[in-house]
Amino acid sequence: MNSPILATVVALAAWSLVMWVWMYATRLPAMRKAKIDTFNLVGGAGSDLKAIIPPKQQWPADNYNHLHEQPTIFYAIAITHALIGTGDGVNLTIAWAYVALRVLHSLVQVLVNRVIVRFTLFSLSSLCLIALTLHAAMAMLGAHHL
């Protein structure tokens, strides 16, 4: 199977890995500057760093975490579209819009972190996800009734 919508899954996964690199490229120098001894550090969580490193150096980590929240639904729905044969046309366009909006959301969060802009991008991407989910449900119900 080679449904076109699978490219959006790969693209968003690849972007998540870009953010992983960005997170550590930012976080590790901030930890060194804060004199955190990573070699002898035991326990703790990434969220513990919020009290230690500057917020701007924490933003990539926050975004990386966000890319593991709602996008998990996107992966499931995009793969569902691929499996049921509806991963092209308007659904493909909506899926690419979702990916683009999530990339823009990442860039805004990491570079300027304007909450109203982030919220707008998140809301628009959520509408894309709702549309993809409704389309998958309609396609499955329609196929079920045949």
Image (cartoon, helix red, strand yellow):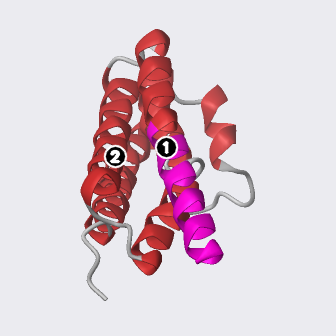
Decide: few, some or many residues near mark 1? Use Cα within 10 Å; few <14, some 14-19, many ≥20: some
| Distance Cα–Cα, label 2 vs label 1 | 8 Å
Q: How many marks?
A: 2
Residue 31 versus residue 83: which sits nearer the camera? 83
Q: Secondary structure at mark 1?
A: helix
Point out which mark residue 94 bears: 2
Residue 128 versus residue 48: which sits nearer the camera? 128
Q: Are marks 2 and 1 in contact (CB under 8 Å)?
A: yes
Q: Is residue 35 visible?
A: no
- Which residue is label 1 attached to? 131
Let me know if residue 139 is in the magenta part: yes
Residue 81 drawn at (x, y percent): 44, 68
Residue at 56% x, 50% y: name it.
Answer: 134
Q: Earlier in the sequence, mark 2 or mark 1?
A: 2
Point out which mark residue 100 bears: none
Up the image or down, 75 lies above or below 69; here it is below
Q: Is residue 55 left or right of residue 87?
A: right
Up the image or down, 10 lies above or below 34; here it is below
Corner quadrant of residue 20: bottom left
Residue at 50% x, 23% y: name it.
Answer: 55
Residue 113 versus residue 146: which sits nearer the camera? 146
Residue 30 drawn at (x, y percent): 42, 36
Q: Is residue 94 left or right of residue 143?
A: left
The secondary structure that most of the magenta stretch takes on is helix
Identity, as a three-letter code, of the amino acid under mark 1: Ala
Span shown in magenta = 128-146
User: Where the N terminus falls, by quadrant?
Assistant: bottom left
